[in-house]
Amino acid sequence: MSIIFDHVAFKYNPGTTYENTALDDINLKIDDGEFIGIIGHTGSGKSTLIQHMNGLEKATSGTIYYNGQDIYDSDFDMASLRTEVGMVFQYPENQLFGTTVYEDVCFGPKNQGLDGKEISLRAFEALRAVHLPEELCDVSPFELSGGQKRKAAIAGVIAMKPSVLILDEPTAGLDPAGRDEILNLIKELHEKNGVTIILVSHSMEDVANYVDRIVCIDKGHIKYDGTPREVFKNYKELEEIGLSAPQVTYLMHDLKRAGFHVDTDCITIEEARNEILRCFGI
Amino acid sequence: MTLGQYYPADSVLHRLDPRVKLLATLLYIIGIFCIDSPIGVVFVTVCLASLIFLSKVPFSFMVRGLKGIMVLLIIAAFFNLLMTPGVPIVSFWIFKLTWEGIKNAALMTIRMVYLIMGTSLLTLTTTPNALTDGLEKGLSFMNFFKVPVSEIAMMMSIALRFIPILIEETDKIMKAQMARGASFDKGNLIQKAKSMVPLLVPLFVSAFRRAYELANAMEARCYNGGEGRTKMKPLRYKRNDYISYGVAGSFFLICIVLGIMF
Ligand SMILES: Nc1ncnc2c1ncn2[C@@H]1O[C@H](COP(=O)(O)OP(=O)(O)OP(=O)(O)O)[C@@H](O)[C@H]1O
Ligand SMILES: [Mg+2]
């Protein structure tokens, strides 16, 4: 079970004056059960990349294999791909339309052709998973707060029980508590249900804390692909393309420069704490 | 004339004042309906060709506008060809092919094609915003008749600005619902209409939200009607604009003279 990008390139509006190369020669293999973070400057092509994973955009050249099948084959079942690869878009709350939150969450499972019982079971399961208070299930989604809307929209995708879940900046514009709640929910889905997670994020801290592998995109190319430690070692190069390393990494470099013999590879607060304690022999 | 088909380039025509281009287009349209002789057609063709050359817009963009009226054009030419009274060359049943018919059909086709190409040239070299600016300035005499020209122009430019935004928004929402398994082209008419709900509801919600936000932002910047507002980039005539008025005027006169003489 895997998603493979084979020399994928993509242009917006090909053949017009507004032609714009968004992806260029992308090669990528995503295995089952991975937790991947995608980072990149704004406009680097992250959203475009992930929209290829469930066939919403079609590569201008190159191809994509899902479980060994070419998704651009004429006999490939795109509908089943979309039920297996769930996608939470940037600002997903803008897509709510149901008369009630419950009805909106049911939309995905209904399109999967499930029977009524299964649909409502999944809807309630998903709503519970995102910690949306039960009394909010029967109100109009337009009456919710921004963060609650976000949760409802995410529930709408989780209810489809995808085996791969892609999230495009799911925490943008949320308060710290809301952000942690969503990230922990994603982590739980990954650990308990074995869902493959692909998380697009602008927060280096979140990426360092949660993901196992980072794919860094710059101007439509893959610049780095590796564990967070490996990628954040290149913090100077990352700064050149408008990114950075987590703040603790800078702290560790400062300490080292000040003469303390600390390991500068630390990327999370936890690691840094242990390293500093070790250095001071406490 | 499709809206927002502006072709970005740096040419003499792109830099002209929109008022000049609007008036010149008007004169051009009247001009091509004045001429009715081969010599006139040659004259207009030469003028149009030089303008297209000056505009630096690829020729394929000019004829793109023709696709939409192709069928209409063929039908009209067909009836002109066979139904015009005159000296018959061949005839069958109620149809007669006449010299007058051939001339009429050719002239009508040329006029329509040139009309589309000329107006396309206007929209291809002028941004929609510049067009509304030009219209606002050019029609400001209507203020005298209590027509709120500035308000109408403001409404027009806002509407034009919102078209690409709404298209983008539609695209986003469509993709998001497709990711949840929606399909927008399956089933009969009623099912299709029903499948539009997940697209239209969020689209309207976001359109109203945007309108509300824009209204607030305008109010916060003290917008209170169009009268007496100054522009950040006021339209000012330059030398080229005066020359172009002259050229457009001469073109018009020559067309009239050609129309009368031949
Ligand atoms: N619908 C579109 N039409 C034309 N060009 C587009 C479209 N969407 C994106 N682009 C262009 O493609 C490039 C990549 O955009 P993309 O949305 O993938 O960036 P991103 O990495 O997701 O940025 P952000 O972090 O701001 O979300 C950008 O240069 C953008 O201008
Ligand atoms: Mg994006």
Image: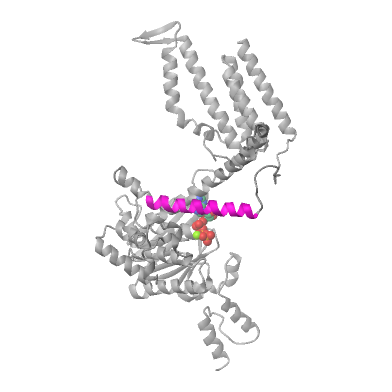
**Residue A32 visible in rendering:** no
In the image, taking residue A118 as reference, residue A128 lies left or right, namely right
Which residue is found at the position 41% from the left and 61% from the top?
A: A141
Left or right, residue B232 beside residue A115: right
- Measuring 33% from the left and 10% from the top, which residue is drawn there? B93
Q: Measured from the top left, where is residue B198 in percent x and y? A: 38, 53
* Residue B258: x %, y % from top left: 63, 14
Q: Judge whether B117 appears above or below B9 on screen.
A: above
Closest to the observer, A81 or B18 = B18
Find the magenta span and give its range. B197-220
Task: Note whether B107 is above or below A125 in the view shown.
Answer: above
Tell me if A108 is positioned left or right of B153 in this view: left
**Residue A71 seen in render:** yes
Where A209 sits versus B261, above or below?
A: below
Which secondary structure type mostly characterizes the magenta part of the structure? helix
Find out whether residue A155 is within the magenta segment: no
Q: Residue furthest bottom?
A: A282
